[in-house]
Amino acid sequence: MELTPTTDMKQLFLITAFILFPLMTSAQRHIRGLESNADLDMTPEDSVGDNDKKIVPTEVYAWNIDDVYGNRTVTYVDTLHHLYQNHNLNEGLEGHYNHLGNLGTPRLSRVYMERDEGDEFIFVNPFDQFFMPTSQFRFYNTKSPFLNADYNLCGDKQSGDSHIKITFTTNAGKRVNFGALFDYIYGEGYYSNQSTAHMGASGFASYIGDRYDFHFYYTHNHMKLAENGGIISESYITNPESQKKSFDSNDIPTQLSNTWGRQDHDIVHFNHRYNIGFTRTEGDSTDMKEVFVPVTSIFHTFHLQNMKRRYIAYGTPKDYHTYTFLPGDSARDKTTYMQIKNIVGLSLREGFNKYAAAGLNAYVGFDHRSYEMEDSLGQGRFGMGTHKESDILIGGQLIRTGGHLLHYNVNAEFIVAGDNIGDFNVNGHGELNLPILRDTAQISVDAIVQDKTPSYYLHHFHSKYAWWDNDGMDRQFRTRILGSVTLPKTRTKLTVGLENIKNYTYLVDNGELISENLEPIVRYTHNINATQCRDNIQIISANLHQDFVFGPVHLDNDVTYQTCTESTPLPLPTLSLYHNLYLKFKIAKVLNCELGGDVKYFTKYKAPTYSPVLGQFAVQNKDNQVEIGNYPIISVYANFDLKRTRFYIQYFHVNQSDGKYFWAPGYPVNPRCIRFGISWNFYD
């Protein structure tokens, strides 16, 4: 069974193209006028120029909100030029992620301090290239309708991938904005039985008023992933001369076929607040105006997640899994998760007078969760079982965003009743700007103290090939401090972090040996389980980002050093490097160009393996461990930016040669290939 676009999907693309074509045609009619006014600071009143020629304002603003209070944090509109050639790679802009090779496959950052807490529905966590949490969802305000179309292509229908992402947003007046987002990833893959097809669609709206504001979005995702279990032997890559014949990448046999993981997500998030305050007169005698000053806000946040995952397998080799827990020859595992979360709170707003240097927020919330998965019904019968949990939580925040010298944000949340009573999370972020040697040093500190019950799926999981009930698990206790210093003029950023973990919870493969001296390939079964490390684990990390400029020659460097006291449950590479050497120049004063090459590298380590049955990364079998790394991945590229258009061409993995290239055990890096991408902004 191949994951190819269905007839309905093809019709959807035709309809989308039919709708977008008039928009693009209209945009092209105005493009010269837009480009000639690209750098003007326009307002709607300025939209009529000489000879009554319409000039379209092009300002677009974007922000994120936090998932509790709805506080806005200004972010960039996704139209950046630098490193555009890497934005669609699974390994990330600077190559920090391990993954399975194909676009849209699960991934895990090798840089520990970049790993976030993740979702309670753990199956979405490895898909953070596609799955978007609330804190990363962009809201907009624009002076004219804005559409960004981004398209990326690699290879052909038999072995390549493509990614299309369309963002549209427009305002209805100064305060109301709405829009939509469409995201589609399709990858056949350079190795067999690893195709991906992810489709996501979102609608969003916001209103920013003096006394009332709200943010709303709805997202639906449908994700399909063919699971191949990795190639049957790494010798096809590491020692191809040992094979009786040569193999193309998609001819190398894999562990699994006719095996898929599928997910469906429906997410609704709504935050709104009502401001109570007063008006005051500001300005001078020639320009006086009434300004509303909020003093107190009442806010409410509603969050709904309805998530489903299925694992479907036909003809799985009998010796691939150690145990079979459900009857039948095929696997059709299913689990569903639903969360309904309501939060109500009160804010004392920052800056309403000179003594209110910080804002103070407090809230109370109710979190209800429902889990459904296979369960034993007794007497050899199995069916779907349901488990429900609820928690009452309280929290607060102290925040300062105004001023130039000092900013900070301290959050605390405690579960005071319910199934996870006693859990708490206290975290903070602070920024200090200090003048140093004709520069301004930006010093930031992040800290976390957390005692949290691991995900329900790490306590309990039931399926055909993996089954556990770990009622004896303790809460995982974490403390972290992360500090950084940024010197903008020298293009330097140094970040140092220290974390301590007690009761680290993780997945491990403890399969059994099934062949030795009977065939050339020694094989083990697979048996995934969840466990805890009772010892304290310390992780020390240092990251240096240093860029150099010598006229048109640029050299960007990202170096990460890590060490861990317990490398068995938490394997990390000692070094992870990214270097990017390029020429930066303009042609005819309008075409921005970057021509260069980059290299990604990490030292050898016993990287986490991947479990298809869970769609998660896990610690390798202690009796069957392999190391990956110590191999540079070099690519060359040309990156261009012309007014409203960005495009690139990249020759990926040009140094493919010596047979050490793996992103994860059993999952090779894609062979050398040409990648292409284009992003176009349209206004009006």
Image (cartoon, rainbow, N blue to C red):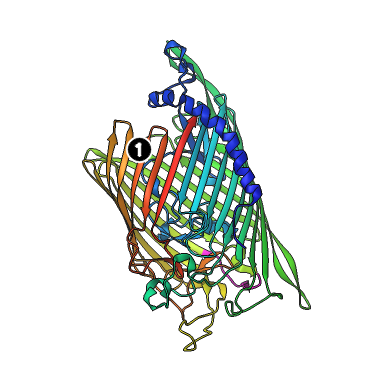
Position of residue 492 measured from the top left corner of the image (x, y, whole percent): 28, 47
Q: Main secondary structure of the magenta part?
A: loop
The amino acid type of the residue labelled 1 equals Leu
**Against 232, is 195 above or below?**
above
What count of labels does the image hold? 1
Is residue 684 among the parts visible in the rendering?
no
Q: Residue furthest front?
A: 245
Magenta segment, which residues? 463-476
**Against 5, is 61 above or below?**
above
Position of residue 108 measured from the top left corner of the image (x, y, whole percent): 47, 60
**Against 286, is 140 above or below?**
below
Residue at coordinates 38% horizontally, 54% vertically from top-left? 482
Q: Residue furthest right?
A: 379
Q: Residue furthest bottom?
A: 517
Residue at coordinates 46% horizontally, 36% vertically from top-left? 680
Magenta stretch encompasses residue 103: no
Left or right placement of residue 88 versus residue 311 in this view: left
Position of residue 154 measured from the top left corner of the image (x, y, whole percent): 45, 52
Left or right placement of residue 276 versus residue 238 in this view: right
Give the labeled residue for mark 1. Answer: 405
Magenta stretch encompasses residue 468: yes
Which of the two residues, 28 or 62, is positioned nearer the viewer here? 28
**Against 540, is 200 above or below?**
above
Q: Secondary structure at mark 1?
A: loop
Is residue 314 among the parts visible in the rendering?
yes
Position of residue 376 measured from the top left corner of the image (x, y, whole percent): 73, 73
Question: Within 10 angstroms of label 1, few (less than 14), some, or many (20 or more) residues?
Answer: few
Which of the two residues, 257 or 223, is positioned nearer the viewer here? 257
Residue at coordinates 43% horizontally, 38% vertically from top-left? 79
Q: Quadrant of the N terminus?
A: bottom right
